[in-house]
Image (cartoon, rainbow, N blue to C red):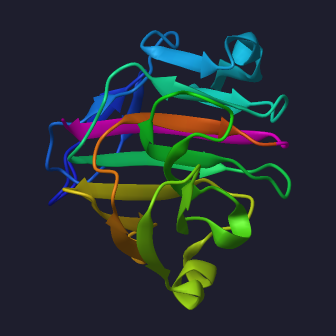
């Protein structure tokens, strides 16, 4: 036991998340509870065992996204990510139907040189700021990085490796969560959520 932290085991691997509990993984043995848009793009998202951990490998092609079936409003979302090359993806929040390749939502950028930046897509509305210097300082190139997103009544904040890099407020306050396939390979692991 590490002082001040709780050891939690996911997929047989010990994780050192901050010990406030209540988090549940968003995938396990398969991607039950997720849907691809378009449906024909399901093959762009695959769970693989990498170094003893369950990793979501995104091929990048075609342009698409995978989304939860469940809607979320107020939550803390945590995940780790890595780009093997100069890659890009995105985590989509508060997606509003109808589902289409570029849906109405707020995106947490998942590109290494601007990871964590918040912006709207598909006609969504919001106002966000980013600390570029902090973002540049905390991202570990070619390594696993940890991102935490907090959503509270439309107010959003993003931390990378424990440092806040973006914040703001969205007019969209609820919706499903998505992960983009956007042209290049990208890796996610230990994606978990607490909230509703």
**Direction from residue 146 to residue 19 in the image, left or right:** left
Q: Residue at x 67, y 50 (%)?
A: 82
Which of the pair 45/7 is nearer the observer? 45
Secondary structure mostly seen in the magenta stretch: strand
Magenta residues span 183-196
**Direction from residue 66 to residue 101 in the image, left or right:** right
Residue 121 x/y as whole percent: 58, 54
Q: Quadrant of the C terminus?
A: top left
Name above or below for residue 132 compared with residue 86: below
Q: Residue at x 48, y 56 (%)?
A: 146
Residue 62 x/y as whole percent: 83, 28
Residue 51 visible in the snapshot: no
Residue 113 x/y as whole percent: 72, 71
Q: Residue at x 81, y 36 (%)?
A: 60
Which of the pair 124/137 is nearer the observer? 124
Residue 46 visible in the snapshot: yes
Residue 185 on the magenta span: yes
């Amino acid at each position: 036991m590490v002082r001040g932290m709780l050891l939690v085991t996911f997929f047989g691997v010990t994780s050192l998340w901050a010990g406030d509990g209540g988090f549940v993984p968003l995938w396990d043995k398969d991607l039950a509870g997720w849907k691809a848009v378009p449906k024909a793009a399901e093959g762009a998202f695959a769970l693989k065992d990498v170094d003893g951990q369950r990793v979501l490998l995104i091929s990048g092609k075609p342009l698409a996204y995978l989304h939860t079936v469940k809607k979320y409003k107020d939550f803390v979302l945590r995940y780790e990510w890595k780009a093997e090359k100069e890659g890009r993806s995105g985590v989509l929040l508060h997606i509003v139907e109808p589902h289409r390749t570029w849906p109405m939502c707020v995106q947490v950028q998942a590109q290494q040189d601007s990871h964590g930046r918040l912006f709207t897509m598909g006609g969504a509305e919001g106002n966000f700021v980013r600390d570029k210097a902090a973002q540049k300082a905390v991202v570990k190139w070619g390594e696993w990085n940890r991102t935490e997103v907090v959503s509270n009544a439309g107010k959003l904040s993003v931390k990378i490796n424990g440092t806040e890099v973006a914040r703001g407020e969205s007019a969209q306050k609820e919706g499903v969560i998505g992960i983009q396939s956007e042209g290049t390979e990208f890796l996610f692991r230990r994606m978990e959520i607490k909230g509703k």
